[in-house]
Amino acid sequence: MAEQKKSSSAVIVILIVIIVIAIVLAVARAKKAAGPAVPPMMPGTEMPEMPVPPEGMPAPPMPPAPPVQ
């Protein structure tokens, strides 16, 4: 019984981690897509939108950067 519980909880944890990573990537992609679409009024207005870089990838110095996959 204990063995089965351990494996099922491990599967649940792995699924939660995968879901969280998918959400983080989707948010990062949405922010990248929304950045260049808005015409910048002043240089540096698009930077405060993303103060913290997404987990696992460095923040691009310029908004029109190729999407990281």
Image (spheres, rainbow, N blue to C red):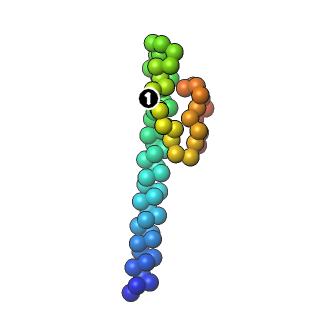
Q: Mark 1 is on which residue type?
A: Glu
Quadrant of the image occupied by residue 19:
bottom left
Q: Secondary structure at mark 1?
A: loop
Q: How many circles with numbers are drawn on the protein?
A: 1
Residue 35 in picture, x, y percent from top left? 48, 26
Residue 5 in picture, x, y percent from top left? 39, 79
Q: What residue is at 41 percent from the left and 72 percent from the top?
A: 9
Q: Is residue 42 above or below residue 3?
A: above
Residue 4 in picture, x, y percent from top left? 42, 82
Q: What residue is at 50 percent from the left and 19 percent from the top?
A: 44
Q: What residue is at 51 percent from the left and 15 percent from the top?
A: 43
User: Quarter of the image containing the N terminus?
Assistant: bottom left
Q: In the depicted view, which residue is nearer to us: 13 or 44?
A: 44
Q: In the depicted view, which residue is nearer to us: 5 or 55?
A: 55
- Provide the residue designation for mark 1: 49
Residue at the far top in the pictured view? 41
User: Mark 1 Cα within 10 Å, few/some/many (few <14, many 20+)?
Assistant: few
Q: What residue is at 40 percent from the left and 85 percent from the top?
A: 2
Residue 13 in picture, x, y percent from top left? 43, 65
User: Quarter of the image containing the C terminus?
Assistant: top right
Q: Is residue 54 above or below residue 49?
A: below
Q: In the depicted view, which residue is nearer to us: 56 or 38?
A: 56
